Amino acid sequence: MSAIVQLHHVYKAYTLGDVTQQVLNDVSLTIDKSEFVAITGPSGNGKSTLLNLITGIDRANQGDIVVCGQRLQQLSEEQLSRWRGIHVGIIFQFFQLLPALSLLQNILLAMAFTNAIPKAQRKARAKELLALVGLAHKAHHLPSQVSGGQQQRAAIARALANNPELLIADEPTGNLDAATADTVFELFTQLHQQGKTIVLVTHNDALAASASRQIVFSTGRLIESHTKMANP
Ligand SMILES: Nc1ncnc2c1ncn2[C@@H]1O[C@H](COP(=O)(O)OP(=O)(O)OP(=O)(O)O)[C@@H](O)[C@H]1O
């Protein structure tokens, strides 16, 4: 197995005024290619902060972070933004699709941002991705014209736009009802079976149990990591 995410002795604190809060406290973690990792744990204990460091949206105060072979602290903000667009697909709790663009255009925009996919192939690929998430018939709808679950599936298709090595999702089912959450989670399971590496944060323990590895995170530390045995 080769590592796709490596954190070595990572520390992160936020300072507001004269108050400093230590959020991540000596976190070391390795995630291998093709793992499906669910991170759970109490609210406010640094799970989103951890994801933001892995995606390079935020920077550690101390420690080493290597993702998809890149030591993130070596990159400028501009380089990080380009690196992220190519190597990492990110899915948020509130979907964050651009409201004035159709589902298809949202995906095309993600491709235009990196140029990782040749221009001539983009439209066909965007349609294939919408078909993959069961939304071929909604390609020209605006986000406001589809349901929450459909918006999240479109957001997953957008995250796949540049064929990233790593998918990161922060509470992707947090804004969905239980039945819709199940269908979105099934999509993650299907992508994992197709070989994608997925790291997500969830408050839903039942959904977390279907991932191949569960990490419990509390008070800025990993307190438990449990890998499910593969089926014989
Ligand atoms: N940009 C920021 N500036 C200052 N404090 C922050 C910032 N981002 C997060 N925090 C603080 O860091 C702590 C951890 O936040 P984080 O969002 O990582 O927790 P979490 O485990 O993901 O919580 P939840 O499960 O509620 O989403 C919280 O106390 C939060 O208030």
Image: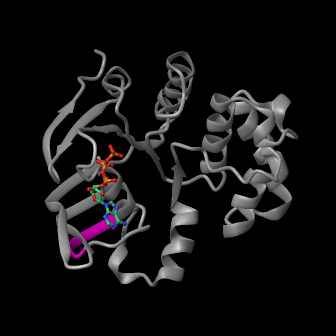
Query: Residue 157 location, x and y as percent?
Result: 66, 42
At 83% from the left and 47% from the top, the residue drawn is 102
Query: Residue 198 location, x and y as percent?
Result: 42, 42
Q: Nearer the viewer, residue 69 or 50?
A: 50
At 64% from the left and 35% from the top, the residue drawn is 153
Q: Main secondary structure of the magenta part?
A: strand
* Residue 93 located left or right of residue 54: right
**Looking at the image, in which quadrant does ligand 1 appear?**
bottom left
Q: Nearer the viewer, residue 130 or 68?
A: 130
Q: Inspect this view and state whether residue 95 appears.
A: yes
Query: Residue 26 location, x and y as percent?
Result: 12, 62
66 in the magenta segment: yes
**Above/below status of 89 relative to 184:** below
59 in the magenta segment: no
**Above/below status of 66 relative to 97:** below
The quadrant of the picture occupied by the C terminus is top left
**Above/below status of 102 relative to 77:** above
Magenta residues?
A: 61-67
- Looking at the image, the residue that sits furthest to the front is 17
